[in-house]
Image: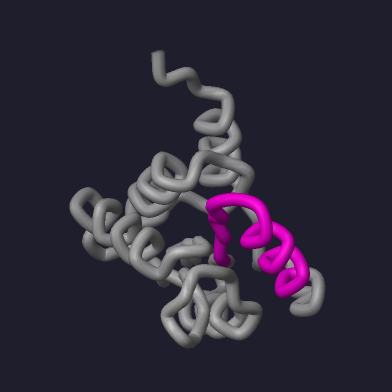
Amino acid sequence: MVGIVLVSHSRELAEATAALGRQMAPDARVVAAGGLEDGGFGTSYERIEAAIGQVLGDDGVILIMDMGSSVMTTRMVVENLEDDRVHLADCPFVEGAVEAMVASQGGSPVDDILEGLGRAARASKL
C-alpha cells in the first residue's frame, strides 16, 4: 500500500485532514507532519523526514503539501533522500489527501494515484 504524508504549516490541519480521509479509508497508511516540534506554525524538516520513514515501503510514498514553505521544505527532504519511491504531489491539500488515501487503500499503484491527483489539481469546484 502506498504511504501518504500530509505536510502542513499547522499540526491541527494535517491531523484533521488525515482524520477526514480515514472516514473513507480507515486502513490507509497516512502520517500527518504538520507544524513545528514546539507545536507552533511552520514546517519541520525533521518531522517530514520522520513521517516518510514511518510509511515508506516498497509501494512508495506520496507527499501532499499545503502551501509555500511546506513545499520548499518537503522538496529539500526529498532531494536529500534520493529515493525514487518518494513522490511529491501537486494537488489541493484536503481533496488530494482524501483521494490519495482512498486510492491507496484500494490498492492503486503510486503512478495511478499521482495521475488522479493531477486531475484533482485541475478540477473546478463550481
Picture coordinates of residue 23, whole percent (x, y) = 19, 53
Q: Is residue 24 left or right of residue 120?
A: left
Residue 69 colored in magenta in the image: yes
Picture coordinates of residue 19, whole percent (x, y) = 25, 60
Quadrant of the frame with the C terminus: top left
Q: Is residue 92 left or right of residue 90?
A: left
Say if 54 sits above or below 84 in the image: below
Nearer to me, 82 or 80? 80
Quadrant of the frame with the N terminus: bottom left
* Outermost residue toward the top in this view: 126
Task: Give the total number of marks visible in the rendering.
Answer: 0
Residue 54 colored in magenta in the image: no
The residue depicted at 47 percent of the width and 62 percent of the height is: 6
The residue depicted at 55 percent of the width and 29 percent of the height is: 119
Image color mode: one colour
Please provide the residue range marked out in magenta: 61-78
Picture coordinates of residue 29, whole percent (x, y) = 38, 68
Q: Is residue 107 left or right of residue 27?
A: right
The residue depicted at 40 percent of the width and 62 percent of the height is: 14
Residue 78 occupies quadrant: bottom right
Nearer to me, 125 or 30? 125
Residue 27 occupies quadrant: bottom left
